[in-house]
Image (spheres, helix red, strand yellow):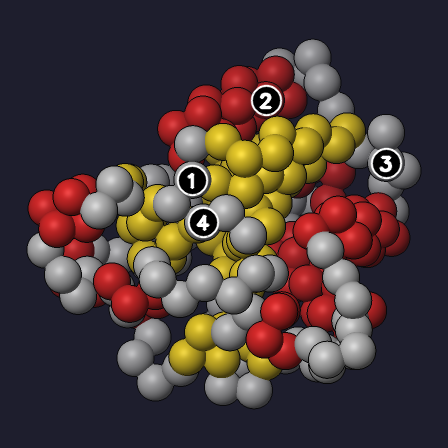
């Protein structure tokens, strides 16, 4: 499994790199790849979402210097921001019996085990995608599969920042809140983004049974 850490990039740059890697994986010119990054502030609307979940006019969002993008992943509306770890696995599912549900379940398991490393209990909620801490969502998941190869992935709230979440209904879920790893860890728990990335990749390698390159 090849690891690519892009640091902080715009959403359009991240999407370009995803598509390029996806095309190379479909053609067999590269192996399974995990792209890690943080995005500039952006709100994205998935295939099952719509602007009805925006709480302010789109024009007002643009005026704040925040992009809004409609994308071809599963799910409704979410956001990305510096301090949130975004993970895009570009993986050929033919090596995993083309089982999309198992793939998503395994992504959720990566997040749950990472949270456990920081003494935070993450949970699935029946009927909802993503991972929750209590009644609050800490990680959103939305994928796309083309020619048996995945795109998009999950967004894990690490640093506390509620500024974008006040502009829309996250994932279209009205009876749940949003939380962040920074808000959930105990006062004596030290961590940074590098530590979070290391634990995510450790569990990725373990769950998907692929060595990291």
Q: Quadrant of residue 159?
A: bottom right
Give the residue displayed 61% in from the left and 45% down from the top. 87
| Residue holding disc 2 | 21
For label 2, the SS is helix
Which mark sits nearer the N-terminus, 4 or 1?
1
Which numbered mark, 4 or 2, is in the foreground of this view? 4
For label 1, the SS is loop
Residue 187 is left or right of residue 25, and the answer is right
For the residues labelled 4 and 2, the Cα–Cα distance comes to: 22 Å
Is mark 2 in CB contact (under 8 Å) with mark 3? no
Residue 105 is left or right of residue 84, and the answer is right
Image disc number at residue 70: none
Depicted 28 relative to depicted 174: above or below: above
What crowding class fits label 4: few (fewer than 14 Cα within 10 Å), some (14-19), or many (20 or more)? many
What crowding class fits label 1: few (fewer than 14 Cα within 10 Å), some (14-19), or many (20 or more)? many
Residue 190 percent location from the top left of the image: 78, 67
Give the residue displayed 45% in from the left and 74% down from the top. 178
For the residues labelled 4 and 1, the Cα–Cα distance comes to: 5 Å
For the residues labelled 3 and 1, the Cα–Cα distance comes to: 27 Å
Which mark sits nearer the N-terminus, 2 or 3?
2
Give the residue displayed 80% in from the left and 33% down from the top. 1
Which mark sits nearer the N-terminus, 3 or 1?
1
Image disc number at residue 212: 3
For label 3, the SS is loop
| Residue holding disc 4 | 81
| Residue holding disc 1 | 40
Which numbered mark, 1 or 2, is in the foreground of this view? 1
Is mark 4 in CB contact (under 8 Å) with mark 1? yes
């Amino acid at each position: 499994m090849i690891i690519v850490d892009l640091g902080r990039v715009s959403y359009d740059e991240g999407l370009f790199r995803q598509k390029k890697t996806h095309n190379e994986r479909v053609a067999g010119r590269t192996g399974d790849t995990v792209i890690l990054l943080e995005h500039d502030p952006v709100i994205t609307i998935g295939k099952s979402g719509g602007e009805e979940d925006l709480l302010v006019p789109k024009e007002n969002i643009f005026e704040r210097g925040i992009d809004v993008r409609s994308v071809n992943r599963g799910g409704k509306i979410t956001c990305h921001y510096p301090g949130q770890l975004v993970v895009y696995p570009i993986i050929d599912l033919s090596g995993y019996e083309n089982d999309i549900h198992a793939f998503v379940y395994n992504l959720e398991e990566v997040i749950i085990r990472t949270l456990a490393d920081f003494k935070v209990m993450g949970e699935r909620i029946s009927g909802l995608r993503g991972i929750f801490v209590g009644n609050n969502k800490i990680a959103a998941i939305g994928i796309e599969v083309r020619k048996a190869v995945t795109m998009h992935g999950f967004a894990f709230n690490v640093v506390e920042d509620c500024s974008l979440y006040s502009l829309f209904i996250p994932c279209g879920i009205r009876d749940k809140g949003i939380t962040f790893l920074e808000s959930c860890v105990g006062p004596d728990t030290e961590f940074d983004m590098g530590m979070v990335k290391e634990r995510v990749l450790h569990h990725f390698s373990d769950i998907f049974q692929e060595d990291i390159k």
